[in-house]
Image (cartoon, grey):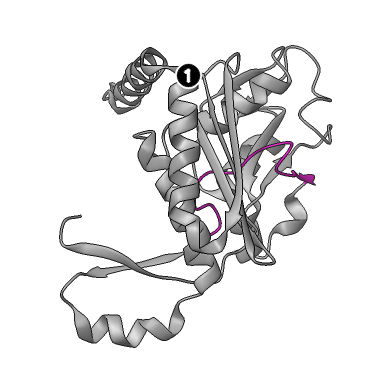
Amino acid sequence: PPNTRLETMLPREDSRDAFISPKYKTIEELPAGSVIGSASLRRQAQILAKNPGVSCVNFRGNVQTRLRKLDDGVVDATMLAIAGLNRMGMQDCATTVLSYDQMLPAVAQGAIGIQVRSDDTRTIKYIAALNHADTKTCVSCERSFLAELDGSCKTPIAGQAEIIGEEIHFRGLVSSPDGKQNFHASRVGPVADFMKIGREAGLEIRKEAGEQFFADLMVYVQNIQAANEKPTKSAA
């Protein structure tokens, strides 16, 4: 919102994704025709890139609802952020916690931020002590990458930054929704250059993919959103 800013980030939870299935341990193990439940275009694209023989279906509801649908056989597998499962004490539900090579997480996944009014100096002063500097630096790097791509949590864009020693390591990915086109960028540099690193990675992918790719992607996302927002007929 205008006149607000993301002032403080709490220490980040594990940002990885969890693969959950009663029969299989990885995306690659799923046989052709299997159904994975996920409403995330980011996850769907990466799933299809690794195993084009499966189908991805929209899968909504809270954690318990999704796990119940999985137990009922509605789908063969689903995916959730391990951060959410950890915070709910449900980490044992995860079949496999996927590495970044297996599934690159969403920008800011696992992080909790506190947004405040820009002129609220009293609140800014009080919450400053809560800020976890490394988390804020990494998330800011990821958000600068996302900003160059005009992306959001509803687009198939992934990005993760880590501070290792005195350097920040960033990996970014943009995919077509069907997983057939995948554009990667990675950067390593001084921590002080965190905004520049994210921004340059975004510009690299934007140049490689081309503007028509992003125009088509935005049309696809808008059509998906419109379909999800259509009112459903109530039973007579």
Q: Residue at x 74, y 51 (%)?
A: 93
Is residue 20 positioned above or below 132 on the image?
A: above
Q: Which of 228/107 is in front?
A: 107
In the rendered image, residue 109 lying in the magenta stretch gets the answer yes
| Residue 210 in the image, given as x and y percentages of width and height | 42, 17
Q: Residue at x 51, y 19 (%)?
A: 177
Q: For the stretch drawn in magenta, what is the main secondary structure? A: loop
Is residue 29 found left or right of 72 in the rendered image?
A: right
| Residue 221 in the image, given as x and y percentages of width and height | 37, 23
Part of the protein shown in magenta:
95-111
Quadrant of the snapshot with the C terminus = top left
In the rendered image, residue 88 lying in the magenta stretch gets the answer no
Examine the image and state in which quarter residue 8 appears: bottom left
Question: Mark 1 sits on what residue?
Answer: 209
| Residue 94 in the image, given as x and y percentages of width and height | 75, 49
Q: Residue at x 80, y 37 (%)?
A: 22
Q: Which of 27/74 is in front?
A: 27
Is residue 131 positioned above or below 188 on the image?
A: below
Inspect this view and state whether residue 27 appears: yes
| Residue 48 in the image, given as x and y percentages of width and height | 65, 20
Residue density around tag 1, few if under 14, some if 14–19, many if 20 or more, within 10 Å: some
Quadrant of the snapshot with the N terminus = bottom left
Q: Which of 103/204 is in front?
A: 204
The kind of residue tagged 1 is Ala
Is residue 91 found left or right of 142 in the rendered image?
A: right
